Image (spheres, rainbow, N blue to C red):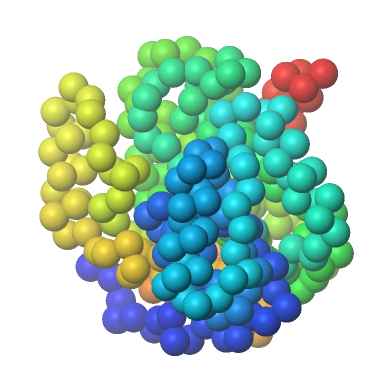
Amino acid sequence: MFSKKRFITENIPDLTGKVAIVTGGNAGLGYITARELTRKNAHVFIASRNKERGEGAVEKIKKETGKNQVEYLYLELANLKTVKQSAENFLSKNLPLHILINNAGIINPCSLTEDGIPNIFGVNHVGHFLFTMTLLDKIEASAPSRIVNVSSVAHIYTDGIEFDKINQEADSFWQSYCKSKLSNILFTKSLSKRLEGKEVYVNSIHPGFVETKLSKWDDSWILTKMVINIALWFSMSPDDGALTQLYAATSPEIIEKNYRNQYFVPFGEIGEKSEAAQDGELAEKLWKYTKDLIDAKLC
């Protein structure tokens, strides 16, 4: 299904002196990513909402790697006030930030965040937008640095975003998920444009079909269930699924080849984006919509 592995964990360079944040780093792809960054001597922060699981992941990584430079950072992406507080808590540590991996994501349920935003869109896109923008000055000051937005091939299954309908419940949770993954790529496009000429490399990735807790959902849409179950039949391990985001976060090729606003698929290959994902006007509309939404919720 995918190319022969052109990037494996042994290709990750020594990351001594580098500081990284992995959202959703307590489980699945995020955990593997945080573990491998720690193994290569990065100072890693696992950002997640569940303190017990987050701290448990920290201790497990310490045991598995024999390294101690890994910490827990509280992050609740469904609450914009706490998203901002989490970023500010990190900033208060007066550390650089070389790698930000926006890995956390949900596919279910179709409910609202504490700010009244559809949960899937709010967690997968809006929360990460605010987290990233609050940390951006630090990321720029730490250059060369990287931002990796974990998207999905699911982005191709939606034609675009109707901003006046985002808060309606007409969409299935699957369409909501697809639009949130499209938003990840559009955010990558807009942010890359704003960072042109700076040593901050922003890219998005599709990890492949990986059986993680994200894929264990329950819904009555039989066709979608069938499609997902077929995909999972061909799924890869979380260890393999994490390779593409590790490539985007650490490979020297990113800087050597000046990779910006790329969409990588397993295992470090440049993938094909949908037409909507390449729409500059749509990307700017999403940027404005998201910024205005956050400003309104935090005022």
Residue 87 to residue 195: above or below: above
Q: Nearer the viewer, residue 65 or 231?
A: 65
**Image coordinates for residue 261, horizontal then vertical, percent:** 62, 61
Q: Quadrant of the N terminus?
A: bottom left
The image quadrant of residue 87 is top right
**Image coordinates for residue 115, horizontal then vertical, percent:** 62, 18
Is residue 275 visible to the viewer in this orientation of the structure?
A: no
Left or right for 221, reference 3: left
The image quadrant of residue 216 is top left
**Residue at x-position 25% and y-position 64%:** 236
Q: Quadrant of the C terminus?
A: top right
**Image coordinates for residue 148, horizontal then vertical, percent:** 58, 59
Left or right for 35, reference 193: left
**Image coordinates for residue 118, horizontal then vertical, percent:** 50, 21
**Residue at x-position 76% and y-position 18%:** 296
**Residue at x-position 52% and y-position 82%:** 12
Q: Nearer the viewer, residue 80 or 252?
A: 80
